[in-house]
Amino acid sequence: DAKTTQPNSMESNEEEPVHLPCNHSTISGTDYIHWYRQLPSQGPEYVIHGLTSNVNNRMASLAIAEDRKSSTLILHRATLRDAAVYYCILRNSGGYQKVTFGTGTKLQVIP
Amino acid sequence: DAEITQSPRHKITETGRQVTLACHQTWNHNNMFWYRQDLGHGLRLIHYSYGVQDTNKGEVSDGYSVSRSNTEDLPLTLESAASSQTSVYFCASSNPRGGGDEQFFGPGTRLTVL
């Protein structure tokens, strides 16, 4: 699977929107973009995924660039519970051999 | 409710001992995975399985083995524990959906090898 690049950390004020970027310039046409988050002392939790079109669910929105070389996870109103490490990964339908979560972006939410 | 559980949650063992970490899911998922998480490395894939009797090596499989005798369980065995295997281990499962499958993770097992 192709590699992703994320900022190490970001800050946001509570109740404001948060835009978490992810670069994946070597993405292939069959790579899905997945986002997971990990709260302190817990296992990762699925957030959202997409292939080409923007996606929305109850947790977040995923905006995918037209060339698919970058994407942005949008939390519409950050809460203290959203403080976590956010991972952007690429998943190809061909297999899991090289799936890696990397080190992600640590989001701090300021009350 | 369906869930994925891991046991034990904490384990301390000595170098050279065999250790088995259990993972049990009631989602009836075909795919199961083991990851380890270390500071500075994120999560790295150890082994994965697409179904009963199927196992595959991940990025960091040396020193680990798995077996899949039923849908619900994928135990991870450290044949001869080493201090470098001190880590937090996460099990996950998913239903096959090409590249769009959502993985459900367990709570993790913190393993310390002295």
Image (spheres, grey):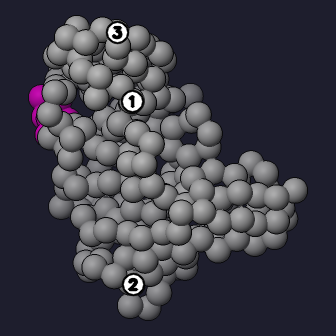
B58 lies above or below A41: below
B94 lies above or below A23: above
**Can you see residue B91?**
yes
Question: Where residue A55 appears, x then y in whole percent?
Answer: 54, 73
Chain identity of mark 3: B
The residue type indicated by label 3 comes to: Thr
Quadrant of the snapshot with the N terminus of chain A: bottom left
Q: Residues within 10 Å of mark 3 (few under 14, many from 20)?
A: some
Lateral position of residue A26 relative to residue A81, left or right: left
Disc number placed over residue A15 in the picture, else none: none
Do marks 3 and 1 share a chain? yes
* Residue at left offset 22%, top offset 37%: B47
Do marks 3 and 2 share a chain? no
Give whichever of discs 3 and 1 has the lower sequence position: 3
Question: Where residue B93 appears, x then y in whole percent?
Answer: 36, 38
Q: How many marks?
A: 3
Magenta segment = B49-56
Q: Which residue is mark 1?
A: B87
Distance in Å between CA atoms under marks 3 and 2? 46 Å
The residue type indicated by label 2 comes to: Arg
A40 lies above or below B6: below
Judging depth in this view, the residue of B107 and B69 nearest the camera is B107
The image quadrant of residue B92 is: top left
Q: Which residue is mark 3?
A: B13
SS of the residue under disc 1: strand
Distance in Å between CA atoms under marks 3 and 1? 12 Å
Does B31 appear in magenta? no
SS of the residue under disc 3: strand
The image quadrant of residue A74 is: bottom right
Disc number placed over residue A68 in the picture, else none: 2
